[in-house]
Image (cartoon, rainbow, N blue to C red):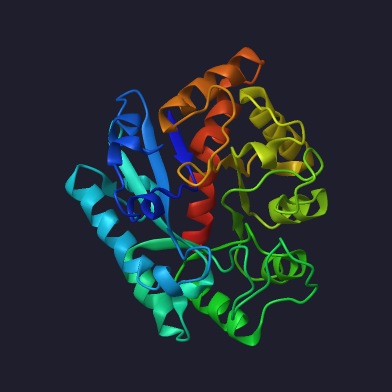
Amino acid sequence: MLICDTHADTLWRLAQPRACAEAMDVQLAHLTDPRHTRVQALALFVGANGLTGADSDLIPRELAAFEALKARGFRQIRHIGEALPGQANILLTIEGGEAFGQELAAVEHYARLGVRAAAIVWNNENRLAHPAKGASKEGLTPFGQAVVREMRRCRMAVDISHLNERGSDEVMDGPAPCMASHSCARSLCGHPRNLTDRQLRQLFATGGYAGVNFYVPFLTDKGHADMDTVIDHMVHMCLLGGEDHVGLGSDFDGIDEYPEGLRNAGAIPALAERMQQRGFSAPLIEKLAGGNFAAYMDRLDRG
């Protein structure tokens, strides 16, 4: 089975002082079961303050961590078709448009490094856009619009996780489908980081993709979640038209509250088993596990 997880903050954690690879939620052993073809997206995060202060050199440190992972046996891929069964296939992404600095040329630079998707904002307003965790009703800035155009030229997915509603509307009204790499449904949990039903319908209708986040405060207002809570978000999104557009976006190594039974990347196959127990058909499980993301990336590559 193809299993794709479209967001993890492993590189950020590895870039911290005294980081220990064996303590990560995403480890080589988690991704190398020969029964599965695993694809794990790893984000270059800009830090809580947008590459300032102690994080001013964060991206180089994360890229060094990425190279170290490859030296240990992880395989960088740029297209899902390159993934091999029993191998730790990793896809490079960006979380935070501060990574592009003030130059459009930076988009092509990262594309050449293999970056396939970028969230243009995190929780802080930046030169490109406004975050979902804020009161702004403004859309993308002129520079943000230019960056999005350049991303699309470079076949880099525009990731609307963390983006506010106005900005999401603007990028979804564009020529290429967007993705939400790690977002849940606001109808099931009222956190402002989650997507409304209107946003989800628009995302799916335009050929986009949504990866369900495993962070407990995004999954439920009740303080406890398990595999069924994650699956409930997937079911809700499917009912909104997402059967061919929904997948997994764990947020591993960036969260500190986990659903019961989903403590690390090695537990994801058990989530597929739970879907089967709940009566999901084998073809639907395969789509939600990774097929939908593979199809989304094919659409992106075709332009």
Q: Is residue 209 left or right of residue 302?
A: right
Which residue is more in the foreground, 111 or 74? 74
User: In the orientation shown, which residue stands out farthest toward the top?
Assistant: 277
Q: Quadrant of residue 168?
A: bottom right
Which residue is more in the foreground, 136 or 104? 136
Tell me, yes or no, if residue 10 can be seen here. Answer: yes
Image position of 188 with respect to 126: above or below: above
Image position of 239 with respect to 201: above or below: above
Location of residue 179 in the rendering, given as x and y in whole percent from the top left corner = 60, 56
Image position of 173 with respect to 133: above or below: below
Image position of 300 with respect to 29: above or below: below
Which residue is more in the foreground, 268 or 226? 226
Location of residue 200 in the rendering, given as x and y in whole percent from the top left corner = 74, 50
Q: Which residue shows up at 61% across the image and 24% down it?
A: 227
Tell me, yes or no, if residue 84 can be seen here. Answer: no
Q: Quadrant of residue 135?
A: bottom right
Q: Which residue shows up at 36% across the image and 33% down it?
A: 37
Q: Is residue 135 left or right of residue 62?
A: right
Location of the N terminus (image quadrant):
top left
Location of residue 202 in the rendering, given as x and y in whole percent from the top left corner = 76, 56
Q: Which residue shows up at 39% across the image and 42% down it?
A: 39
Count the labels in the image: 0
Q: Quadrant of residue 189?
A: top right
Location of residue 298 in the rendering, given as x and y in whole percent from the top left corner = 48, 53
